[in-house]
Image (cartoon, helix red, strand yellow):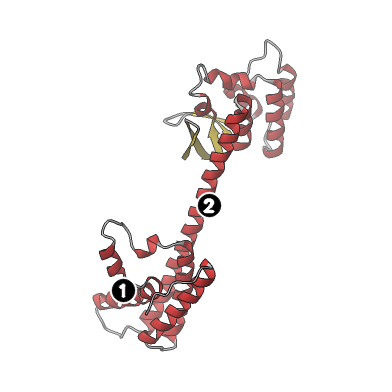
Amino acid sequence: MAKIKVETTEITIISHNEKDYISLTDMVRPIENGLALIEKWLRNKNTIEFLGIWEKMYNPLFNSPEFEGIKMEAGLNRFIMSVKQWIEKTHAIGIIAKAGRYGGTYAHKDLAFEFASWVSPQFKLYLIREFQRLKDDEQKQLAWSAKRELSKINYRIHTDAIKANLIPSEITNQQAAIKYADEADVLNIAMFGMTAKQWREANPDKKGNIRDYASINELICLSNMENINAVFINDGIPQPERLIKLNRIAIQQMRILEDTGGRYLLK
């Protein structure tokens, strides 16, 4: 579930069958007798035709014969249609009625935009803008999360190389942990110019660790460096030499990724 603010109206968006459904109820809540607008919209013949076309495109279980009868009646003075009736008679999936805390009438984004246009063309444009902003933010977060997960996977490859090549046999778990932290800080120094401890001391108000605040480009670079360092470890290259090599790689890759003059992290 997510919320967007369109002008002064807060609108709920839920996921239903892995699709975005927008609250029609929230759209009309600020309007006097606004809830009646939803059923008024459903009684409109053009609305019924539009909903029917959408359902035929995306709903293989849509009851087309029942829909044809409804379409014939639509527009007449005696015609009445509620959300519940529309769903029960046609097996529609584009509009749903949800109970509970965030209850109300929700519609697939295609239909919700159409409803917003019927209510107010200006409101529709603001709605589309805020909805797209939400989707853009979600994509950015998804990309960051994917890079963070990639970094974690490569860190496992990295620590396995340490265990196989740098940690002597028959040492305590505490000693092993110290060696892992030491090797992790090789990458931290090469990338950020400081150890994890130094970062925590410099940022006592922040939660997490130095990598949680890294940019996507920095995470990409770290992911590459973890793989490279694992190869260096397997080749038996001493740690000080690896640190210098990794820093040079970090500078080169960040120059390419950022396309700005690079970051010289080791002097």
- Distance (Cα) linking label 2 and label 1: 32 Å
Query: Which of pointers 2 and 1 indicates the residue nearer the eye?
Result: 2
Q: From the viewer's side, name the closer residue of 128 and 178.
A: 128
Residue 221 visible at all: yes
Q: Amino acid at mark 1?
A: Ala
Q: Residue at x 47, y 78 (%)?
A: 249
Question: Where does residue 254 sit, x and y in percent of width and height?
Answer: 49, 71
Q: Is 30 positioned to the left or the right of 123 in the image? A: left
Vertical placement of 258 versus 158: above or below? above
Question: Where does residue 199 sit, x and y in percent of width and height?
Answer: 30, 66
Q: Residue furthest top?
A: 77
Query: Quadrant of residue 162 in the image?
Result: bottom left
Residue count near mark 1 (Cα–Cα under 10 Å), binned few <14, some 14–19, many ≥20: some
Assign a secondary structure to mark 1.
Answer: helix
Residue count near mark 2 (Cα–Cα under 10 Å), binned few <14, some 14–19, many ≥20: few
Which residue in the protein does label 1 denote?
A: 181
Q: Residue at x 31, y 57 (%)?
A: 207
Q: Is 9 positioned to the left or the right of 60 in the image? A: left
Question: Where does residue 153 sit, x and y in percent of width and height?
Answer: 45, 68
Q: Residue at x 64, y 31 (%)?
A: 114
Q: Is 236 positioned to the left or the right of 33 in the image? A: left
Assign a secondary structure to mark 2.
Answer: helix
Q: Amino acid at mark 2?
A: Gln
Vertical placement of 206 versus 89: above or below? below
Which residue in the protein does label 2 denote?
A: 139
